[in-house]
Amino acid sequence: MPSKSADTATIEAEIDRIRSLGLDELRNLWRKTLASPPPAAFGRDLMVRLLCWHLQEQAFGGLDPNTAKLLNSLLRGDKHRPDRRLKPGTVLVRVYQGLRHTVTVAPDGYVWREQAYASLSAVARAITGTSWNGHRFFGVGPRHNCPMHTDVERPDGVANGASPRPRATRKRRPTRELR
């Protein structure tokens, strides 16, 4: 296997060579490269893929720290939470008490009314005077890193997120007292 200083052409040539090997030759290369026998369930295609990946990892480096951290957390069974960071330049709009508030995401925070803030929660606090989760206040969903709704008028004249008619309420049965 080539060293980390190998050029791309050498790596590609080695990958082509690995792809041309038979099953027994792949098993021998696996033992020599990884110092363990290949799993019995691994077929030729999977062995080729893993050996080529290992070759590229040795030549170009492994996973970046964020990806390694994500994979380790998934291995432990942790739930994956998407990145909630918004990209600079994103404009968030919220109508609060009849006033339209526009916040622009900056590289180092948020800008509202030409004043910089460190967090969306600080902006929400400045707008409302009370403590708010900034992502919730501006309707930024935790799942897709996008607004849960926008304040754009629909053709029927109703802003998204608002209901055009009152919701029907469910009738509840009266509770019985236990004796």
Image (cartoon, rainbow, N blue to C red):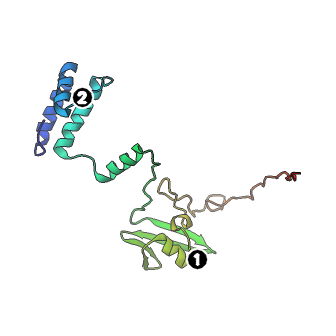
Closer-to-camera residue (32/7)? 32
Q: Callout 2, which amino acid?
A: Val
- For the N terminus, the quadrant is top left
**Image vertical order of residue 176 relative to residue 52, above or below:** below
Q: Visible in this render: residue 94?
A: yes
Q: Is residue 22 visible?
A: no
User: Callout 1, which amino acid?
Assistant: Thr
How many angstroms separate mark 2 from mark 1 (CA)? 59 Å
Q: Residue furthest front?
A: 179
Name the quadrant containing residue 8.
Answer: top left
Q: Report the front residue among 153 and 150.
A: 150
Tell me what residue is drawn at x 62 percent, y 62 percent.
159
Query: Disc 2 designates what residue?
Result: 48
| Residue 103 position within the rendered picture, expressed as x and y whole percent measured from the top left | 48, 71
Measuring from the top left, give residue 166's x and y in whole percent: 75, 59
Q: Is residue 156 above or below residue 14?
A: below
Q: Residue at x 63, y 75 (%)?
A: 97
Q: Which mark is first along the chain, 1 or 2?
A: 2
Name the foreground residue: 34 vs 148: 34
Which secondary structure, mark 1?
A: loop
Residue 174 in the figure: left or right of residue 129:
right
Locate residue 162, reporting x and y percent.
Answer: 65, 61
- Figure quadrant of residue 74: top left
Mark number for residue 148?
none
Residue at the extreme right: 179
Label 1, on which residue? Answer: 130
Element under disc 2? helix
